[in-house]
Image (cartoon, rainbow, N blue to C red):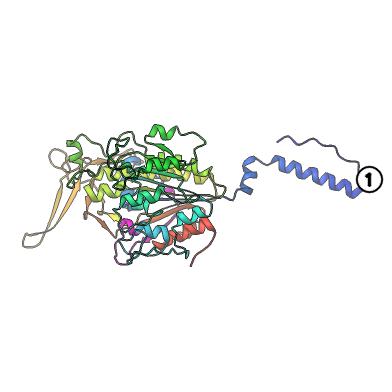
Amino acid sequence: MQNLPRFKIPHVGNFHSKITVVFSLFLLVVLASCSPKTQLSGVDSRRNVIFIHPDGTSPSFFHAARFLHYGPDGTLHWDKLPYTAVYKGHMKNNLTGSSNGGAVTHAIGVKVHENSFGLDENGVTVVARSGKPLTLLEEARQAGFAVGIINSGSITEPGTGAFATRAENRDNHEEIARQIIMREAGNDIQVVLGGGEVWFLPKDVAGFHGSYGQRTDGLNLIEEAKERGFTIVYTLEQLKNLPSETQKVLGLFAAWDTYNDDKDDAPVRHIYTEEQLAAEGLTDFLPGTPTLAQMTEIAIKILSRSSAKGFYLVVEEEGADNFSNSALNARGAIEATKRADDAIGVALQFANNHNNTLVITASDSEASGLSVIGNPRLDNQGNVVPTREFRRLDGSVYFIEHRDGKNGTLTPPFISAPDRNNQRWPFAIAWSTGGDHSGNVVARAFGYRANMLRGTIDNTEIYRIKYKALFGILLD
């Protein structure tokens, strides 16, 4: 019990006064016996939303990650999200969602054409479902919430960039980076963590990671960020050692992306398959860069102390999509999915201790149709047979199934973690295509207002649920 303040009981001259004093003492004892946590929960009205976008993933990606890291009977953090809905991801003009169109839909809550980056077909800013020409992140910031964006790829990628900027083309990284940093006072994004250092520097300036900038307008956005009060970090060690009073941080952990799906500065497209990575001595993810979970943990610490209203955090694992669509790199895609799941775990840990927090996750489409094949055919060397041909009656081939082992084509199979009987099982990965398609996307959620996610939902509903959690308003 906490110590009660000392005071003298006044002399009382009648029965009713004595009862009043006794009752007052009783109330003081009850209040003092309440734990600090109990007292805090009664007055803490902060509302938080953490949106995690594991780009390109479907349940098959998470099955593969579960098999490899936890076993077929194991449990991912993704599995702990109790509310689930089948996700309808079509665009205004395409049955298949695009990365930029899908991100815009998640950011503003209305359907857009597949090439939109916050603008309609006529180049006009799209009005959000709330009736305002603002993304949810921008509206939250104007309302006093703290906000942040995180990406394992370049921070200018649609999965983060579309929540804070508008551009005529998703490839206009210079303009997207400029809008992320050069914002009006009070509308700044307090936490910006990802890759893409080259888009923040002029062409004649070498960056921390050794590559020259790509900006043609002469702007040095890193210096601009410093002038606007940002602390700049480039490494995991610097991120982990940020001063406790840090309020704004710009983390640029790679010149391009924190993973190797292709050679970004090559004059012609240079795809990094598993075999090409091995030939060049490269890894799927850049060594020493912070994982999505590590970035998410630091971001939550900063944002949760930055506003009395709460925060809105957008987190994207871009690697799952790029490893699949660019390189058909099964190993990298599974690792990226595991990293997204680890970030979900960080968000869940916070949400379990902060009742007014929503954790919600969804991709916008499925990348290359990743499928898991158990007990795959092996050749005499123990490698996964890389193709399976399907033939017509006349012997002609009408379909070829392509399969990957743990290190690409003609390599041994992946081996699962033990099941409940301590058995391990081989599996391979098959691909149905080489790009985005309307696959089996599932949205999941935990926490505050998560019960709004159930059954089958449209992609526009992701915004609506987040809006309700932040503002308490259920939009039409």
Give the camera-side residue of 124 and 105.
124
- Secondary element under disc 1, as helix, strand or loop, is loop
Q: Position of residue 47 (x, y in %)?
A: 54, 51
Q: Which amino acid, mark 1?
A: Gly
Residue 281 against residue 296 in the figure, above or below: above
Counting from the top left corner in percent of width and height, residue 414 is at: 25, 41
Split into 4 quadrants, where in the image is the N terminus? top right
Q: Nearer the viewer, residue 340 or 118?
A: 118
* Image quadrant in which you'd find residue 413: top left
Instruction: Report whether 372 appears left or right of 247.
Output: left
Q: Can you tell which quarter of the image residue 96 is in?
A: bottom left
Instruction: Report the residue marked by disc 1.
Output: 13
> Furthest residue to the right?
13
* Magenta part of the chain: 77-101
Residue 469: percent from left, percent from top: 51, 56
Instruction: Give the total number of marks visible in the rendering.
Output: 1
Q: Quadrant of residue 383?
A: top left
The residue sitting at 30% across, 62% down in the picture is 114
Name the residue at the front extreme. 218
Residue 94 among those drawn in magenta:
yes
Q: Is residue 282 magenta?
A: no
Horizontally, is 246 left or right of 125 in the view?
right
Q: Nearer the viewer, residue 237 or 173?
A: 173
**Residue 24 on image: x %, y %:** 80, 45
